Image (tube, coloured by chain):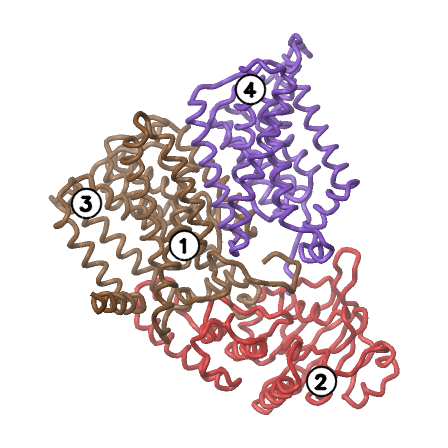
Chain colours: A red, B purple, C brown
């Protein structure tokens, strides 16, 4: 059953067409990967899905509802959360506080509740703290909860972004190059985490360069090149697809 | 209903003040583009240039020498400001807001010292060339106005040639586009920063000096000049020299017509009303580039 | 002697880490102070500190925590002052009602002006607020039929509860500091909450905040309005204390002074405003006092210079504000506390004074 689908997606930046007429369908509970050479339009696609960039053409639907044109925060509320290719942590907040921001849409208190320290706010803070700690335990960062996120090593910062996205309690999790910059041990750890999340019922949409990771976790893959979809299928099919090989000619496996 | 004579008068005074604002705006744009700092002391450069020229003139030196000395002195002021305040702050990792506040502090220091040296009196300079006031279509135009526009155009042209044709100028531009890459190419951003402050000092001084024969100079003229020049720079997009010029002229003209036709009490407000309108309609200024954050 | 020093350090450290304790001690100090100070002159300074602290706390919420800039905040201060002044002096409203109405009007103005300009980024936002501030100032000057123009508005009554009128400085002191302490308490609570975290996340990365479900547009506008109301209340209090107001107190220089107070004190801290305001006001007064003794005749001009020099030096050597520098030095000798507010710990990336050491991108941050 399709949970997230895009139809004829197009994005132009002035004269440059970053994404051109792309169709895709993500089925519930699967790990769906988007791969392609640099500049193929993968992150642009993510930015379109999450409302960061407006569409030049096409439409996106989530659980049957049209979401293109919606502002990012409403898309998050509906159940799509993401991580960022070049880390967008809140470096003025601690690790725990970062994740608690992910809980934001599950709260109701406003300025008055906060300012006057009303019981609802105190209860909500407790709830958020517990939910956030749970996510941190899931990714293995619980001991560093009270450190400044900026002080974490890079690999753990990536995990933090995932924990933060998980706090949104999304139905679909978008991971933008989650293993970029990680060594092989860390990459394997992350791949294992991704599989664990899938077992917990999460649907995951993944952009990644690292072929080993992609081939090991993805259920289905779509390949973009110069903004166009050039292939779609299972890892085995993609690995043997001549067009894909041609697009990647010269690129090494990670 | 204003007569033709009035309209021409508004146009003349608008273009004149516009030229002043344009020169100030140019200074803003240069510093902003090279260092990312909004130099809120830019107006004080104009003021110091003007008052120094007055003092030098009183010593009896020939007028051209007076002007050159004054401009050089303010160039030196810009250099001192950059070396003593901006550079140390930046090397300690100061944020943009901090740097802006520093320029405010420097502006206060300069203003305070000017107050001590020159007092609150307004001063004047003779026109660059003795000539009679022109009458155009019933309106007055003093020849000094030509100097304003002329010098402004000259500065823009020289700046353009400098930025496009000389090695140093191209290096300056490179710093704007990509500081890190410029450094890797052997260009020192600190030097470029210094150069930008020096240039802006000079431009500011020219603005102050050329305007004094028309409008009296005093120690507190810098504030409003700076602010309006700032408005002009933003209206022009903060990223281009031609934009600054057009922004300056626009502010000058709209201010002049607004004050003449609608109300002179609110004259100062016009520049800022323009500003708000421009920002509302085109947040990146009239000629600026739209930037967006890559995530 | 050493043990006293150690005890002091431990005590200060304890206070620094425990916000509630610090607040209570501060409140007690404030209420005891008038007993220790005889002169009205110092009472007056303390009242000034209280009023400006309210403004700067609101400004810090906007600038330090939410990361937005305002170079025109004196406009809201003025709207509160003139709102209260006109409603009471000209139309005979009760001062308390007038204060509430003035705050509501200011909130409305902030909402209307904020909606379009908060879409702007950084410098453009700064400029828009600057322009707005100047326009309001000019309106105060020109609309003399209502505001009294440059000569100002006089005959503003005192605040009163029943028969008791807050006429004298000492009486007003208690009233205004109650407001100030309340303002600080509210601000602290806001920062330490879902809303506060959301605001701070906007400061750090607006895109990421939105992607986590934070309605950034709405929140930025809300905090802008809140900070405007803070300034408005301060303005009303000022009007009823001075009984006379003129546009001079609400211009560009005032707006800049508030920003300077915020920056010197430390923008991303709740206590920063108190320190910043105190330091600046004390500095100004001290200069006014000392300079004539050094320079003989008129010291006025020298004040500006010395003030400027001190400002520049503080900004160069303590860009995170005085509070942060003091705190950091305090923390270097003490073990870190688990539950401290992140704004106070050592970090490479602080929201107020320092920038990321980013070498990876060419973009500005």
Percent x, y of residue B149: 68, 24
In-image side of C282 versus B262 (left or right): left
Q: Is residue B64 visible?
A: yes
**Closer-to-camera residue (C204/B202):** B202
What is the distance, in whole Å, between disc 2 and disc 3 at their CAs? 69 Å
What is the distance, in whole Å, between disc 4 and disc 1 at their CAs? 41 Å
Q: Chain of mark 3?
A: C
Percent x, y of residue B122: 47, 19
What is the distance, in whole Å, between disc 2 and disc 1 at their CAs? 47 Å
In this rendering, the label closer to the viewer, 1 or 3: 1
What is the distance, in whole Å, between disc 1 and disc 3 at their CAs? 30 Å
Q: Quadrant of residue C186?
A: bottom left
User: What residue is shown with label 4?
Assistant: B56
In-image side of B150 versus C86 (left or right): right
Determine whether the residue tagged by mark 4 lies in a helix, strand or loop: helix
Determine whether the residue tagged by mark 2 lies in a helix, strand or loop: helix
User: What residue is shown with label 2?
Assistant: A214
Q: Quadrant of residue B164?
A: top right
User: What residue is shown with label 1?
Assistant: C321
- Asked whether the residues under the numbered discs 1 and 3 touch, taking CB atoms below 8 Å apart as contact, a structural biologist would say no
Q: Chain of mark 2?
A: A
- Please report whichever mark, 1 or 3, sits nearer to the chain's N-terminal start: 3
Q: Which mark is residue B169?
A: none
């Amino acid at each position: 059953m399709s949970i997230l689908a895009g139809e004829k997606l197009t994005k132009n930046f002035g004269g440059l067409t970053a994404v051109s007429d792309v169709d895709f369908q993500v089925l519930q509970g699967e790990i769906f990967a988007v791969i392609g050479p640099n500049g193929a339009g993968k992150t642009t696609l993510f930015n379109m899905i999450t409302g960061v960039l407006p569409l030049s053409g096409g439409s996106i639907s989530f659980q049957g509802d049209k979401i293109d044109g919606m502002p990012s925060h409403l898309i998050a509320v509906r159940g799509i959360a993401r991580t960022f290719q070049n880390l967008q942590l809140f470096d003025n907040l601690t690790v725990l506080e970062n994740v608690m921001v992910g809980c934001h849409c599950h709260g109701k208190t406003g300025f008055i509740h906060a300012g006057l320290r009303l019981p609802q706010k105190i209860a909500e803070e407790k709830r958020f703290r517990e939910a956030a700690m749970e996510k941190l335990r899931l990714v293995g960062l619980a001991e560093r909860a009270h450190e400044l996120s900026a002080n974490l090593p890079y690999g753990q910062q990536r995990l933090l972004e995932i924990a933060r996205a998980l706090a949104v309690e999304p139905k679909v999790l978008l991971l933008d190059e989650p293993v970029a910059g990680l060594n092989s041990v860390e990459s394997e750890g992350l791949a294992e985490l991704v599989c664990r999340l899938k077992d917990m019922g999460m649907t995951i949409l993944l952009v990644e360069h690292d072929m080993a990771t992609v081939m090991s976790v993805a259920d289905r893959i779509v390949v973009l090149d110069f903004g166009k979809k050039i292939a779609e299928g299972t890892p085995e099919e993609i690995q043997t697809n001549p067009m894909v090989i041609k697009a990647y000619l010269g690129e090494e496996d990670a | 209903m204003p007569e033709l004579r009035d309209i021409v008068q508004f146009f003349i005074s608008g273009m004149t003040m516009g030229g002043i604002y344009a020169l100030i705006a140019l200074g803003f744009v240069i510093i902003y583009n090279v260092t990312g700092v909004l130099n809120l002391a830019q107006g004080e450069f104009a003021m110091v240039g003007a008052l120094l020229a007055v003092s030098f003139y009183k010593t009896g030196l020939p007028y051209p020498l007076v002007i050159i000395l004054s401009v050089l002195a303010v160039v030196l002021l810009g250099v001192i400001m950059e070396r003593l305040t901006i550079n140390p702050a930046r090397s300690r990792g100061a944020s943009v807001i901090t740097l802006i506040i520093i320029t405010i502090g420097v502006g206060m220091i300069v203003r305070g010292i000017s107050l001590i040296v020159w007092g609150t009196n307004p001063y004047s300079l003779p026109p660059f060339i003795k000539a009679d006031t022109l009458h155009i279509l019933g309106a007055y135009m003093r020849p000094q106005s030509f100097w304003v526009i002329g010098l402004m155009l000259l500065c823009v042209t020289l700046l353009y040639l400098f930025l496009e044709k000389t090695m140093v100028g191209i290096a300056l531009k490179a710093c704007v586009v990509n500081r890190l890459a410029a450094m890797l190419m052997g260009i020192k951003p600190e030097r470029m920063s210094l150069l930008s402050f020096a240039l802006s000092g000079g431009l500011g001084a020219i603005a102050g000096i050329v305007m004094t024969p028309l409008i009296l100079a005093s120690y507190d003229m810098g504030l409003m000049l700076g602010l309006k020049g700032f408005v002009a720079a933003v209206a022009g997009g903060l990223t281009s020299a031609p934009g600054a010029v057009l922004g300056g002229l626009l502010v000058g003209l709209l201010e002049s017509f607004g004050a003449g036709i609608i109300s002179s009490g609110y004259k100062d407000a016009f520049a800022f009303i323009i500003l708000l309108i421009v920002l509302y309609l085109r947040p990146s200024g009239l000629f600026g580039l739209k930037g967006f954050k890559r995530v | 002697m050493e043990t006293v020093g150690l005890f002091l350090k431990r005590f200060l450290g304890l206070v620094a880490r425990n916000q509630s304790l610090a607040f209570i001690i501060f409140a007690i100090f404030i209420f005891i102070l008038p007993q220790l100070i005889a002169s009205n002159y110092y009472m007056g300074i303390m009242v000034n500190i209280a009023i400006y602290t309210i403004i700067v706390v609101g400004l810090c919420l906007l600038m330090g925590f939410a990361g937005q800039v305002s170079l025109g905040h004196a406009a809201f201060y003025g709207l509160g002052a003139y709102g209260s002044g006109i409603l009471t002096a000209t139309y005979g409203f009760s001062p308390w009602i007038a204060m509430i109405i003035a705050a509501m009007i200011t909130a409305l103005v902030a909402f209307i002006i904020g909606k379009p300009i908060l879409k702007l980024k950084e410098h453009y936002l700064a400029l828009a607020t600057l322009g707005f501030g100047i326009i309001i100032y000019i309106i105060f000057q020109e609309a003399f039929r209502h505001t009294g123009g440059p000569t100002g508005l006089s005959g503003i009554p005192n605040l009163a509860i029943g028969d008791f009128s807050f006429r004298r400085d000492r009486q007003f002191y208690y009233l205004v500091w109650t407001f100030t302490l309340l303002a600080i308490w509210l601000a602290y609570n806001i920062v330490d909450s879902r809303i506060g975290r959301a605001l701070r996340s906007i400061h750090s990365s607006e895109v990421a905040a939105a992607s986590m479900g934070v309605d950034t547009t709405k929140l930025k506008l809300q905090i802008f309005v809140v900070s405007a109301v803070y300034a408005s209340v301060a303005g009303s209090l000022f009007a009823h204390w001075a009984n006379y107001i003129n546009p001079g107190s609400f211009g560009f220089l005032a707006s800049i002074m508030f920003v300077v107070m915020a920056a010197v004190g430390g923008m991303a801290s709740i206590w920063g405003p108190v320190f910043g305001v105190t330091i600046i006001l004390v500095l100004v007064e001290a200069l006014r006092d000392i300079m004539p003794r050094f320079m003989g005749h008129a010291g006025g001009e020298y004040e500006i210079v010395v003030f400027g020099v001190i400002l520049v030096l503080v900004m160069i050597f303590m860009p995170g504000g005085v509070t942060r520098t003091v705190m950091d030095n305090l923390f270097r000798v003490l073990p870190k506390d688990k539950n401290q507010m992140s704004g106070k710990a050592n970090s490479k990336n602080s929201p107020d004074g320092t920038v990321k050491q980013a070498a990876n991108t060419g973009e500005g941050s």
